[in-house]
Amino acid sequence: MSRAADLPDRLEISGTTFARVESPGTLACWTATAGPADDLPPVSVVMEPAAAPDQRASDLAAVVLARFGELADVGADYLRHRLREPGFGLSGTELGMLDAAGPPFAEPAAVVWADGTWLLRFAESDLAMADPYGIGVLFEGTVPSGVEDLSEADLL
């Protein structure tokens, strides 16, 4: 495991600067802070155990950065379909929200992990299961692979 002092303070991924942020000793986390686009998407890279990102994590972060809007739309569509399953327990009113013109999800942010998976978290939603931390879509590469109920999560 790398010591915090051994970790880079900044990463450059596809022309975007990621700055290291405070995190527990077992983790290393960098968040996008500056890039070529004025509307920089909220993307973070998290390594556990704490280490500098390898090429796989950096490549995935580059894809998420480049396709953020498209992947946020894919994630919202995935939620609209998956949340209709009875196991999620949405009320009739909430199911109606899924049919509205715009999805009931907003404020997307991405966290990329070393294993090639990542989470797109919609921090804002009127669905009860999204209170208080939002709702997440797990991805493997660019393909949604699961719904993450964050209602009882312990977020950093």
Image (cartoon, helix red, strand yellow):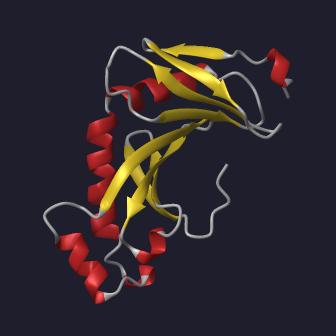
Give percent across and percent down for residue 81: 28, 68
Question: Which residue is located at x 54 percent, y 34 percent?
Answer: 44
Q: Is residue 57 above or below residue 150?
A: above
Question: Which residue is located at x 36 percent, y 70 percent?
Answer: 126
Give percent across and percent down for residue 17: 51, 16
Q: Does residue 154 appear left or right of residue 75 in this picture?
A: right
Q: Does residue 127 appear left or right of residue 70 in this picture?
A: right
- The answer to which quarter of the image holds residue 103 is bottom left
Q: In which quarter of the image is the N terminus?
A: top right
Question: Which residue is located at x 38 percent, y 40 percent?
Answer: 142
Q: Is residue 72 above or below residue 106?
A: above
Q: Does residue 134 appear left or right of residue 115 in this picture?
A: left
Q: In this view, does 1 lie above or below 122?
A: above
Question: Which residue is located at x 69 percent, y 16 percent?
Answer: 9
The residue closer to the viewer here, 127 or 141, is 127
Q: Does residue 149 appear left or right of residue 53 in this picture?
A: left
Residue found farthest to the bottom: 92
Tally of numbered tags? 0
Give percent across and percent down for residue 80: 28, 66
